[in-house]
Amino acid sequence: MPSLPEPIRNLIFAFERLPGIGPKTASRLAFYLLRAPEEIAQNLANALNALKTATALCQVCFNITLVDQPVCDICTDPRRDEGLLCVVEEPLDVLVIEQTGGFSGRYHVLHGVLSPIEGIGPEDLKIQPLIERVKSGKIREIILATNPSMEGDATALYLHQQLAGSGVRITRLARGLPVGGDLEYADQNTLLRALAGRQDMS
Amino acid sequence: MPSLPEPIRNLIFAFERLPGIGPKTASRLAFYLLRAPEEIAQNLANALNALKTATALCQVCFNITLVDQPVCDICTDPRRDEGLLCVVEEPLDVLVIEQTGGFSGRYHVLHGVLSPIEGIGPEDLKIQPLIERVKSGKIREIILATNPSMEGDATALYLHQQLAGSGVRITRLARGLPVGGDLEYADQNTLLRALAGRQDMS
């Protein structure tokens, strides 16, 4: 970048390292912050600094929790069904499912998916603690809510094999047409899944 | 947001205050930083902190410069044409024009546009210093490169009136079809401008 003062260049580079932010957006953000009230950049800097020092993983479900609260709010909430466990890839998935308001069980965050290409095996994920949670005997059903992707499916398959003998019901999120979607724009695989998983109208 | 630890919530809110970043992107960025190497968040925080303390406005053209360098690189570059002045709204516009590699003159950054609705008048912009630069007598041509928007046009018109008696050539960036564009998708005004501004083929 020609003749751009280093502090701005550094900020643009720092923004560019974030996912989904390209050079154009990074420049726009940096120049926006230059003329915005100082407090906006300051708040962001402070929040970034606090992120890793103030957060930790829940000792039960491995979702994000506060450093001084080793078990997270969901795991300690007595109103949530201890028998229903939703297994997700990332903490963000917990947030997404919570926002639907349609799940009242608990979670288990794997922190990734199996990926032989990237050298990620079962020991790199929170799979062993999951097996131990299931062994504790309180769990009735496990919903494998990994992504409907190649890796997500492979991980769900692996977990299914590992947990098969436990006597626990194991389910996977339904596949089909997205709500509000259009048959015309659905890809072949989704349409095949929607056909195979067709349901009786009640 | 249900059951989200405060440090993440704060970071999501801080990201949401940036332009073009909605709640979904803000969550994605925050959760990405949670699992990314700490250095990525750290670099961003440091760059944010340095932004306002290390930068200042160039005393000549009001582009961004370093605190310890009161006149910017472009204004001090003897290879750049002192007689050709490009007037832009924001420092980011300087970057955009520099990236084309097609301009070898100097700049003047207004830091905004006239906007009666927002109460922004000539005295809120760097217009007086522009008039004084023109009076200095070294300038041959002024390119008014404010945005092709209502406010940008009004600002250009105002500047044209103010500078009319100075004997300096005053130009405005050409309007027309964007390169690679499609007649079919051009809006009426752009098409009208492209017709009115049609040029002889050489």
Image (cartoon, coloured by chain):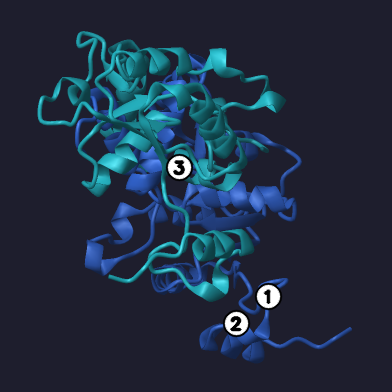
Chain colours: A cyan, B blue
Local crowd size for mark 3, using a 10 Å CA cut-off: few (<14), some (14–19), many (≥20): some
Chain letter belonging to callout 2: B
* Residue A8 shows up from this direction: no
Q: Residue furthest left?
A: A79
Q: Is residue B106 left or right of residue A177?
A: right
Q: Position of residue A8 (x, y in %)?
A: 52, 32
Task: Identify the disc placed on residue B181.
Answer: 1
Cα distance in 3D space between marks 2 and 1? 8 Å
Cα distance in 3D space between marks 3 and 1? 27 Å
Image height of B46 relative to A22, above or below: above
Q: Secondary structure at mark 1?
A: loop
Residue type highlighted by circle 3: Leu
Task: Identify the disc placed on residue A29.
Answer: 3
Q: Secondary structure at mark 2?
A: helix
Local crowd size for mark 2, using a 10 Å CA cut-off: few (<14), some (14–19), many (≥20): few
Residue at 50% x, 63% y: name it: A194
Residue type highlighted by circle 2: Tyr
Q: Position of residue A145 (x, y in %)?
A: 42, 38
Q: Which residue is mark 2?
A: B185
Q: Are marks 2 and 1 in contact (CB under 8 Å)?
A: yes
* Residue B179 shows up from this direction: yes
Nearest-to-viewer mark from 3 and 2? 2
Residue at 66% x, 85% y: name it: B183
Residue at 23% x, 14% y: name it: A71
Cα distance in 3D space between marks 3 and 2? 29 Å
Q: Position of residue B115 (x, y in %)?
A: 30, 66
